[in-house]
Image (cartoon, rainbow, N blue to C red):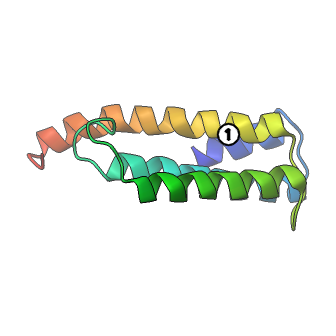
């Protein structure tokens, strides 16, 4: 996912190197959230409710990273629609990964 979004930033959006660094930061934060939710459950990610602490930590992580990226605090600012689109892409990545994970784990007899 990381490479595709960064390539989109370079070739379709014409982002500068500094803006790509901000986009890379956002991609890493959002991608880590996506994999956290897919890795915490051997079944589909919606099979069990995450703890309240995980939900709070995730919300804080996403809010802080988004605020830094859109506000340009310590980095080149990105438009809000770019950050929101990256969040949507990370959620789509989590769902696709989840649908691949379940049959693979079943085939490996890990479930």
* Residue 94 drawn at (x, y percent): 45, 39
Which of 77 and 14 lies nearest the eye of the viewer? 77
How far across and down, in percent of the image, does residue 83 sit?
A: 75, 42
Residue 97: where, in percent of width, then height? 39, 38
Q: Is residue 32 visible?
A: no
Q: Nearer the viewer, residue 11 or 5?
A: 5
Query: Where is residue 69, by image quadrant?
Result: bottom right
Number of residue marks: 1
- Asked if 28 appears above or below 3 in the picture, the reply is below
User: Does 107 sit left or right of 3 as displayed?
Assistant: left
Residue at the front extreme of this rendering: 52
Residue projecting furthest to the bottom: 74
Query: Which residue is drawn at the image coordinates 19% and 44% (left, top)?
Result: 105
Q: Residue at x 82, y 39 (%)?
A: 80
Work out whether residue 64 or residue 10 is closer to the camera in this orientation and state it. 64
SS category of the residue bearing label 1: helix
Q: Is residue 8 visible?
A: yes
Q: Residue furthest left?
A: 109
**Residue on which disc 1 sits:** 86
Q: Residue at the location (87% across, 57% down)?
A: 17
- Position of residue 17 relative to residue 104, above or below, is below
Q: Quadrant of the C terminus?
A: top left
């Amino acid at each position: 996912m990381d490479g595709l979004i960064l390539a989109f930033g370079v070739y379709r959006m014409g982002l500068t190197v500094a803006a790509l660094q901000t986009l890379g930061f956002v991609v890493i934060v959002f991608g880590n959230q996506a994999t956290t939710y897919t890795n915490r459950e051997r079944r589909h990610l919606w099979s069990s409710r995450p703890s309240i602490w995980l939900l709070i930590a995730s919300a804080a992580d996403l809010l802080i990273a988004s605020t830094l990226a859109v506000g340009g605090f310590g980095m080149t600012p990105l438009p809000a629609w770019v950050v929101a689109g990256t969040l949507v892409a990370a959620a789509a990545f989590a769902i696709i990964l989840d649908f691949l994970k379940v049959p693979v784990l079943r085939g490996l007899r890990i479930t």
